[in-house]
Amino acid sequence: MEETELIKGLHTVARKYCLTKGMYWSRKYSKLMKQGMEREEDGFDYSLDAKKLYPRYVVLNAILPELERYVPDDFSSFLVAKSKLYTVINVAISFLTEANVEDDISRNTMTEERRNLLLI
C-alpha cells in the first residue's frame, strides 16, 4: 500500500470514528434523558451515567472539526500525519469540553474517549 493511501486511510478512519461514535454516544444520552435519568435526585448535578456518556460526544464533536482542518495532502509522510492527528486528538477543545473539565468524572470520560480514538 502506498504511503498516500495510508495517510488517507488514517485521516478517514479518525473522522469516521468521530462521526459514528459521536452519534452513538449522543443517542445513548438521549435515551438516558427520555428515561429521566440524566440528573441527580436534587435536579442540579448530572448523574454518574450522564457524566459517562455526554462528555464522549462533546469531546468527539470538538475533535472532528480540528481533524477536518486537514486533508491527506497536507502531510508529507505517514509519520507526520500520525503525529499531527494524534496531537489534534489530544488537544482539541470547545466551549463544552472546557465547561466539563472541572468535574473529575467528566474530564476522565473525555480523556478515555480521546484514548479510544488514538487506538484506531
Image: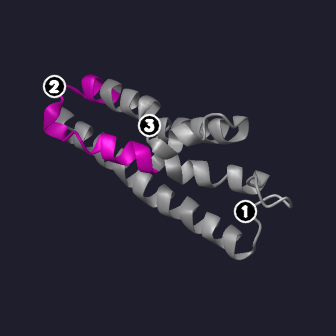
Give the SS element for disc 2: loop
Front residue of this view, candidates 1 and 26: 26
| Residue at x 48% of width, y 41% of height | 117
Q: Earlier in the sequence, mark 2 or mark 3?
A: 2
Q: Secondary structure at mark 3?
A: loop
Q: Amino acid at mark 1?
A: Glu
Measured from the top left, where is residue 16 in percent x and y?
37, 54
Give the percent coordinates (x, y) of residue 12: 30, 48
Q: Does residue 113 appear anywhere in the picture? A: no
Q: Which mark is residue 24?
A: none
Which residue lies under the disc numbered 3?
A: 93
Q: Is residue 67 magenta?
A: yes
Q: Secondary structure at mark 1?
A: loop
Among the two numbered marks 1 and 3 on one chain, the one whose residue lies closer to the N terminus? 1
Label 1: few (<14), some (14–19) or many (≥20) C-alpha neighbours in 10 Å: many
Callout 1–callout 3 Cβ contact below 8 Å: no
Q: What's the amino acid at mark 2?
A: Ser
Q: Give the quarter of the figure containing the N terminus.
A: top left
For the point 69% across and 76% down, the residue is 34
Q: Which residues are magenta?
A: 61-82
Residue 33 versus residue 95 in the image, above or below: below
Q: Amino acid at mark 3?
A: Ile
Write the residue at 43% across / 29% down.
91
Residue pictured at 70% horizontal, 56% vertical: 50
40 with respect to 58 (left or right)? right
Residue 68 falls in image quadrant: top left
Q: CA distance from mark 1 to mark 3?
A: 23 Å
Disc 2 from disc 3: Cα separation: 26 Å
Q: Is residue 41 left or right of residue 81?
A: right
- Measured in 3D between alpha carbons, the distance from the residue under mark 1 to the one under mark 2, in whole angstroms, is 45 Å
Looking at the image, residue 103 lies above or below residue 81: below
Point out which mark residue 38 bears.
1
